[in-house]
Amino acid sequence: MPRDPQTCAPSSPAMHGPRRRQLLCGAAAFPLFGGPGAAAAAAAAARIVTLGGALTEAVYLLGAESLLVGTDTTSLYPDAALKTPKVGYMRQLSAEGLLSLRPDAVVGTTEAGPPVVLDQVRSAGVRVELVQTDHSWDEVRRKLRTVGSVTGRERAARALQAQLDARWAGVQQAVAGTARRPRALFILSHGGSPMVAGSSTAADALIRFAGGTNAVGQFSGYRPLTAEALADAAPEVLLNSTQGIEALGGEAAFWQRPELALTPAYRRRALVVMEASYLLGFGPRLPGAVRELHARMQAFAA
């Protein structure tokens, strides 16, 4: 199974600037810090470990970062998350590492594991909450609702969710109003041989949400990148993460790969690069990521 695109690479410029200010300032419009009642509700989970960047983002947006005692290596945003103790990659956890932080609750997704490790953590009396992943907007809502429950900030979570639902509806409307559906291909290149994303992947869902067509949607999961596959797929736009491009040596080195010359995207150097947790994290920033991806794909397809 390929490594999750949300890596533990250092944060990139894509994580900063207007997007960050817009999200955090928008969240500040709600009473996210709550009052004495909220603090009392959170007392049952005074020490929390999050496994997944989107869940960590939700903790910060709800003003509950003081409860965080650890995060996984995909938790790269906001910048403060980089300074939290790390328990490792969310798919390769150890019970010792998690329990050493003495958490009251561990919050992750069904992608976290191995399962035996999480069973050991439960056996030690720690509350373990896992959010089902299905690469949908409902997944984002489940993550926020779960974090709100564990941190005792349910009311704030509902308020923030109402704001995010409105943003999501606006993005969907904008995408639906565009007739052009460019053929796009996501390339996973964080380590080892590059692979392409088929159906049942976060990248496939993002392409569809942003008004594109996955050029290799006829298979599920990830498969190796080959010249024959690229020629048959004929993508008009190529997608990659900031971390993936860095692993390949930069954009100039990326375009030197001979198999890319077989694609329509090569002729226009049509490449969209976005930070991995922003692009594929399925968290509170998803509406912004979809809107940006839609605009950039449409610009190449024009």
Image: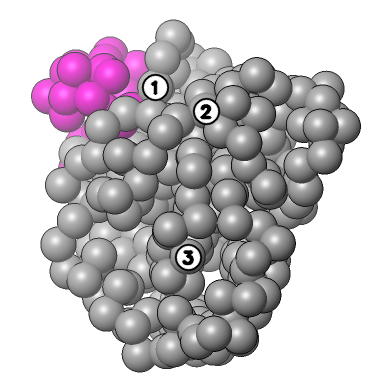
* Magenta stretch: includes residue 77: no
Tell which circle, 2 or 1, labels the residue nearer the N-terminal end: 2
Q: Residue at x 59, y 56 (%)?
A: 46
**Taking 173 as reference, is 155 left or right?**
right
Query: Disc 3 marks which residue?
Result: 64
Q: Is residue 228 among what the camera can see? A: no
Of helix, strand and loop, which one carries label 3? loop
Answer few, some or many: residues within 10 Å of disc 3's Cα (few below 14, many 20 plus, some between 14 and 19).
many
Question: Distance from label 2 to label 3 (Cα)?
Answer: 19 Å
In depth, the one of 98 and 230 nearer the eye is 98
* Residue interval drawn in magenta: 242-268
Q: Main secondary structure of the magenta part?
A: helix
Examine the rendered structure and indicate whether residue 64 appears above or below residue 282. below
Answer few, some or many: residues within 10 Å of disc 2's Cα (few below 14, many 20 plus, some between 14 and 19).
many
In the picture, which quadrant includes the N terminus? Answer: top right
Tell which circle, 3 or 1, labels the residue nearer the N-terminal end: 3
In the picture, which quadrant includes the C terminus? Answer: bottom left
Q: Residue 54 location, x and y as percent?
A: 51, 54
* Magenta stretch: includes residue 246: yes
Question: Distance from label 3 to label 1 (Cα)?
Answer: 31 Å
Tell which circle, 2 or 3, labels the residue nearer the N-terminal end: 3
Q: Are the residues at dot 3 and dot 1 in contact (C-beta closer than 8 Å)? A: no
Label placed on residue 87: 2
Q: Residue at x 38, y 29 (%)?
A: 8
Of helix, strand and loop, which one carries label 2? loop
Q: Residue 159 location, x and y as percent?
A: 54, 88
Q: Residue at x 61, y 85 (%)?
A: 37
Q: Residue 98 location, x and y as percent?
A: 62, 29
Residue type for callout 3: Ala
